[in-house]
Amino acid sequence: MPTVLAGDRSLASVIAHEISHSWTGNLVTNRTWENFWLNEGHTVYLERRIDGLLYGDQFRQFKALGGWKELQNAVNTFGATNPLTNLVPNLHEVDVDAAFSSVPYEKGFALLFYLEQLLGGPDVFLGFLKTYIQAFAYKSVTTEEWKTFLYSYFKDKVEILDNVDWNGWMHTPGMPPVQPKYDMTLANACILLGNRWTEAKASDLSSFTAADLKELSSHQQT
């Protein structure tokens, strides 16, 4: 852990992720590897909630958008029809190491982020997560048990939950059936500067200075 204590705090998310595993992964854990997203999707969600507290919600949304792109890269690598890109894959006679990817992390996060937006926002959804962790503390859990508990907690929003394409999210390969909405403020700053670079002529190069990067975080710069 000390190796990620960068001077600019740019790797604080890694520490936040591992701390979050104290709850989602250690206190409550997936029962089988098919349900690995219950560990990693929830942990990425909590990691980014901590990011939001440290740096503001625009940063959380920026990291979430980056996660969507990372998921797209994983799907492209495996192939959009590869069943290993299911959120809940069938791993019977499959080498778990060969199946490992960012899919359970980022597809799992995307589902939780999508549900957050459907069910009332960050604070409402964090209330669900706290109750879920308390209910399953010191136990292992399956996706079906998680889903049953979700319906029980949001019993006043069953109609909303029934409209979620659960099969598309969990048991269908490729990208999720719905893309969550993202605050694009920090991403647009990167896009604007990138467009300036790509559209610049040789005679314009002197107009670019280190000041162009001054307001961008290390995450935006990379």
Image (tube, rainbow, N blue to C red):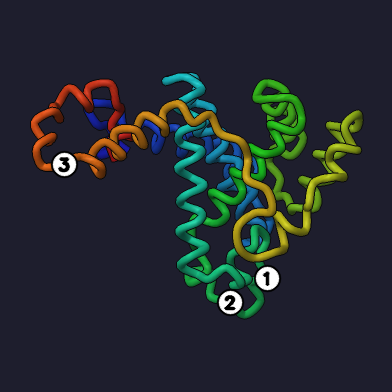
| Count of marks, rendered view | 3
Q: Which type of secondary structure does the marked residue at label 2 adopt?
A: loop
**Label 1 near label 2: C-beta < 8 Å?**
yes
Q: Could you tell me residue 48's position as x and y percent?
A: 51, 32
Q: Which residue is mark 2?
A: 94
Please give the name of the residue rendered at 51% of the width and 54% of the height, measured from the top-left corner. 71
**Label 1 near label 3: C-beta < 8 Å?**
no
Residue 17 vertical position relative to residue 147 in the rendered view, above or below: above
Q: Nearer the viewer, residue 14 or 111?
A: 111
Q: Nearer the viewer, residue 204 or 167?
A: 204
Please tell me which of labels 2 and 3 falls first in the chain: 2
Q: Which residue is mark 3?
A: 201
> Which amino acid type is shown beneath numbered disc 2?
Val
Residue 148 vertical position relative to residue 134 in the rendered view, above or below: below
Q: Could you tell me residue 33's position as x and y percent?
A: 62, 62
Q: Which type of secondary structure does the marked residue at label 3 adopt?
A: loop
Q: Which residue is mark 1?
A: 90
- Left or right of 91? Residue 21 is left
- Left or right of 91? Residue 20 is left
Kindly tell me whether residue 116 is visible in this rendering.
yes
* Badge 2: residue crowd in 10 Å (few <14, some 14–19, many ≥20): few
